[in-house]
Image (tube, grey):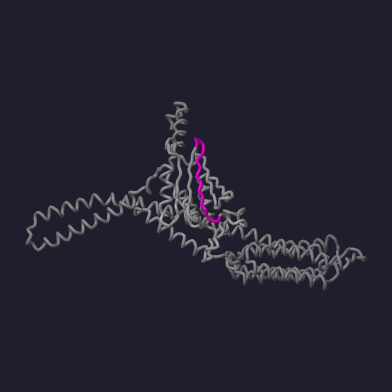
Amino acid sequence: MDQNFLVRGWSAARLSENLSVMASPFTPPARSLGLRLDTLIRLRWLAVAGQTLALLVVYLLMAFPVPLAACLAPVALSVLLNIVLRARYPGATRLPDLTAGPLLAYDVLQLTALLYLTGGLSNPFAFLYLAPVMISATALSWRTTATLGAFVVFCAGAVGLFHWPLPWASVGAPVLPDLYLAGLWVALTVSVAFIGLHSWRVAEEARELADALAATELVLAREQHLSQLDGLAAAAAHELGTPLATIALVVKELEHSVPKNDPHAEDIALLRDQVKRCRDILQKLTSLGSGDAPFDRMPLRLLIEEVVEPHRDFGIEIAISLPEDPAGEPVLARNPGLIYGIGNLVENAVDFAAHRVDITGRWTPTHMELVVRDDGPGFAPEVSDRIGLPYVTSRARTPEDATGESGLGLGFFIAKTLLERSGANLKVENRAAPEHGATVRIIWPRSALDLEESETDLASNQRTMSPEVTKGV
């Protein structure tokens, strides 16, 4: 195994360790991003405008006996609260759960006060109780959302039992049966639970996806950085070689012109040794960039060998099967994302294999296919339909696994995302009985990766251009 593979193997191990630290196990309260103060203030202004308009329309246009002064008092309190918050805190402030939760609870109390004065649950605006719960579900933790939902259910029950009569135009205002009001309360409770849970789940999936994509970008950036280091080392060695050769020549001339008993002879000998040491260092730097890694173009079999090489010393046999005739073999650009994605799938197969991993490659004039099979336990049935989602562990551990560790579910997601960016289509499945293990099939259209195919198409297109267009190109 050459130095380049050792360096990359160590870097991949460090990268996996960093990802494990960064993507810590999911705990709902810690994943809350907080609620922006400006958003909360704007939503409250919208509520204030809607409440004021509804009260004026009912009182002035519909002539209902609404206790207008008493109803405008909670609305004015919301206006005052918004002014104080806007004056005291910057709008970009993100409110944590301990601050945003009480502010949303205030909105629930303000709505409860209005409903108490205008008919309780018989008021059709009672379903505005759902708004604070939905806001909390999309921005705050599940614990805060559940607490706020329970508070909403309590306030709705209280205002259903104790409230002023519903304002009505005529003397004979309708009286709703208690059973119907109880049904409204139950419907409101179910709506709070269902909409709150659904909104939180959707928002949480979006947060998980954002975190996983950020991890993907980090992996790709570090892989690209490693590739750039190889080229940088070779370039530095090349640029420093010429002045160092000049220094060596001058030192040699000085050594010949100075007598051996001269007091400066010792200094010149030391300078010669340091020049030799510099040459050795440059030679090591050059060796980091002289292997297969820095090649911009490589055939498929060479890319597979580079991916597989770091995983051959773990006691698992890795068998590579490719067509013997190299005619028509795809020539690929050395893409860090492609190498990391395939390498992650191979590492995953080696990790779970019992004895052997088979890697099969084949190609046609239109497509290229890579299949990774292992003889491990295969994909767990409970997650087989969710493989590739972030934070979903892809495999079932064997009973002999004493550690009981399981992955964070980011590795397969990152590999899948990077490979799909290259134009691949991934299919995962368990091997058919009586065999056991997992199969990952990666299929690319050759036009997406094959450099020779792309160059052939480009040359063909240029030949079909008119002379004027070709001259312009």
Left or right for 469, reference 90: left
Quarter of the rendering containing residue 83: bottom right
Nearest the viewer among 447 and 404 is 404
Quarter of the rendering containing residue 14: bottom left
Nearest the viewer among 307 and 323 is 323
Left or right for 254, reference 417: left
Which quarter of the figure is the C terminus placed in? top left
| Farthest front residue in view | 434
Q: How many marks?
A: 0
| Farthest right residue in view | 172
Residue 130: percent from the left, percent from the top? 73, 63
Residue found 42% across the figure and 42% down from its top: 299
Question: Is residue 368 a member of the stretch shown in magenta?
Answer: yes
Q: As displayed, is residue 342 above or below residue 470? A: below
Residue 38: percent from the left, percent from the top? 62, 63
Q: Which residues, given as a range, are shown in magenta?
A: 364-377
Nearest the viewer among 144 and 329 is 329
| Farthest top residue in view | 467
Residue 227: percent from the left, percent from the top? 40, 51
Question: Is residue 155 a member of the stretch shown in magenta?
Answer: no
Residue 118: percent from the left, percent from the top? 82, 68
Nearest the viewer among 112 and 15 is 15
